[in-house]
Each structure stands twice: as C-alpha cells, then as structure tokens.
Amino acid sequence: MALQITTARPDPALLDLPWSTPLEDWPEHHLAALPRGISRHVVRFVRLSGRVLAVKEIKEDIARREYAMLRNLRRLDQPSVEPFGIVSGRVDAEGNPLDACLLTRHLKFSLPYRALFSQGLRPGTETRLIDALAVLLVRLHLMGFWWGDVSLSNTLFRRDAGSFAAYLVDAETGELFPRLSDGQRAHDLDIARVNIAGELMDLQAGELLDEGVDPVAISNRIVTRYEELWVELTETEEFDTGERWRVEERIRRLNALGFDVDELAITTDIDGTSISIQPKVVDAGHHSRRLLRLTGLDVGEGQARRLLNDLDSYRAGTERQNDDEEIVAHDWLTRIYEPITRRVPRELSGKLEPAELFHEVLEHRWYMAEREQHDVAIERAIEDYVGSILPTKPDEVSVVGVDTVEMPVIVDGRRP
C-alpha cells in the first residue's frame, strides 16, 4: 500500500512524521504533549511548521466521512475545529495495515472540559459550560445538523468575556439534513443529557466537582436552556398592528441572546388587524460581526459585546457621538485597545488571548475603582493586572495538549 495524504493545504513536513508507527507509540519529540484523555480513539497533538495539529487514529472510511462533515460545517460557518487532512495507506515495519489518521487544527486558547475543572475554577462553571453547549447545539440544529454524540468530551471551550463559547470537535456520528424533525432534536437532547450526567459524575468521583453539585440536575439544564433558546429563536409571535414596536423588541431579545436576525417573515391576517412575526434566518454573532466591521478584530461574541461597550464609553467620554462611527472605532483601536494589549510581556503572552485579556483588564479596573471609590485609568489597571494577576494564570494557548487526566488541581494558587 502507498501512503496517501489528502489535504487542502499540502505541507511537506507531514512526510517527516512516523506514519509507519501506531499513533500511541509515537516518540515524544514529535508530540506537543502526551495526552491520554478519555476519547474512544487514540489522539495525539503534534507541532508541524509552526502550528499544532490534532491527530486521531480511526478507520479510513470514518476519517473521510468526518473530514467531509467538518469541511461542510466550516463552510456553513458553524463553530467547529478546522479539518486539515487525512493520512491513509499506513503500514507498519512488517507491512501490516494501520488505521488512517484524521488531522485537525488545534483551536488556540481552547480548553477541554476536564482541563477546566482540573484548574479549580470558581463555583458555577459547570452551568456556564452547559449554557455554552446549549447555544452550540441550537446553532447546529438550526442548520440541520444532527450530532448523534453530544457531550462535553466532544466539545472544546474558549473563554468569552468571563463566560464560554463552545466548539464541536467530534463529528464522526453527525449528519446534515435540510431540516431536523422534532424527534431528531429530542434524540440529540436525550443523548446530551445522559452523556453530560455521566461526565459530571466522573468529575465528582475524581473530586473535581464542587460539593453539593447535582450532576443529574446540571445535565437536565441542557434541556431547559436549549428549549428556551429554541423557542425564542423560532416561535411565531402575534400582536396588533398598533404594537409594531414589538418587532424591534423581539430583535433586541434575540441580540441579547447572542443571535442576529438576518431576515424576518412578517404576515398580516385578512383584515390587517394583527401581525405575525417569526425569525426566518438566524445566526449567532451580532456583536462580533459589528466589531469586525468597525475594527477588524475577530473575537468571541461575549468579548465583542464587552469591547463594544468600552468603545461606546470611549465615544461618550470624548464627546464624539456625532462623529463617524468607523473613525471613532479606529481611534479607540489605536489609542486604547492595541496599546493595552501590547503591554503584556512576551513571557506572559500565552496566558490569555488579547481580547480576553482586555476584558479582564476592564474587569480589574472596575474592581480597583470600586475599592478606591474613584475612576482608575486603564493604563494603571493594566500595570496592576500584569503585575499581580496575569502571572498566576495557566498558559491557555495550548493547554489542550496537556494530559488532563494527570493535571494537578490548583486551588487559590496552591496544590492541595
């Protein structure tokens, strides 16, 4: 058999990897880390040409199907890992066939759920992860994607202005349809509820979950949060023609949930006395798209909302409400955002991505102002944050490559 490498971006360095060796036996000098994880497949992370790739060893037909599915999800602008390629036709030194490998790009600053809990995060983290997963599942279902294996293990999380944004990792069981039936959506939700309960019980057994947290109650939250989001995004609302202000109110509610309304279907009854409104096409990212248009910054939705709030405050504080929004945004970017994010020393640059760093500096400034009972300049806030807070944080740029099974639990900066 001849080695076959399928990729949209060929990289000759791929030929230097030991494809004739089973993935679990790859030498350490090729790896970004040696994760054991809890995946049903062997997964390793390798550094290649300045990037980090996840390599998953699976049957060739499954690898090709998942590669195609991830490409489709990326084309549909869904939150998922980016497929990089497939390596098939592998044989060992004795000529015995080996499984194919699926390659995906490592999502920078992303965290598997076990790594999050291994860091001893504040209480309530589990509910924020469930909320992020509910938003992801609603987005996928609106696009007609049936996941088939919804779980925390098959999801990566990125910090998003103190909350989390969720990304699909494993798509090997997924299917795309023109539209999902209520039964398909309910099936995915039932799978999610059972899987999440089991994963949280596993954390509880490892003493990584706060005392008093009920894994079953938390897993049921995925159902309630999903249903709340689904109703808000898809239900038809009726009101009298004299209440047209409620159209704007509906849009504002959707924006507050992190969704934008691309198109509305509005119909009136025969005598024209009432209006029915239903979002026709919805997608996440209202604030992130606005920030991208104004500044070119491509960040998470919660981060974008926080940065836009600071931009609006800057606009008001400089009395430039009547100036062109794009010009004010450029000034804010060059005078506030970029100088602050550049104040981080090189050795600490892997702690947080710039947008999350800026959000935390804003939070830190607010706490300083509350403590001192007067306004605090952001330059002073970043200086204090870099000196006292940032060095204590774990590096998140590539923590996904760490063996999360063996990560120590850190509580208040100390090992228990």
Image: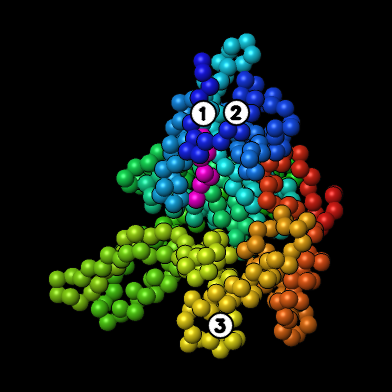
Secondary structure type for disc 1: strand
Question: Badge 3 local density, few (<14 within 10 Å), some, or many (20+)?
Answer: some
Residue 225 coordinates in the image, percent (x, y):
50, 57
Q: CA distance from mark 2 to mark 3?
A: 53 Å
Q: Earlier in the sequence, mark 2 or mark 1?
A: 1
**Identity, as a three-letter code, of the amino acid under mark 3:** Arg
Q: Which numbered tag is attached to residue 5?
A: 1
23 vs 184, nearest the viewer? 23
Q: Quadrant of residue 411?
A: bottom right
Q: Earlier in the sequence, mark 3 or mark 1?
A: 1
Q: Which numbered tag is attached to residue 341?
A: none
Residue 157 coordinates in the image, percent (x, y):
60, 51
According to the picture, the residue beneath numbered tag 3 turns out to be 315
Q: Is residue 36 magenta?
A: no
Secondary structure type for disc 3: helix
- Residue 319 horizontal side relative to residue 349, left or right: left
According to the picture, the residue beneath numbered tag 2 turns out to be 15
Q: Is residue 165 visible?
A: yes
Residue at the image point whose x is 61% and y is 39% from the top = 53
Residue at the image point whose x is 31% and y is 66% from the top = 264
412 shown above or below 316: above
For this orientation, the residue located farthest to the front is: 12
**Identity, as a three-letter code, of the amino acid under mark 2:** Leu
318 vs 110, nearest the viewer? 318
Question: Badge 1 local density, few (<14 within 10 Å), some, or many (20+)?
Answer: some
Q: Are marks 2 and 1 in contact (CB under 8 Å)?
A: yes
Residue 117 coordinates in the image, percent (x, y):
70, 49
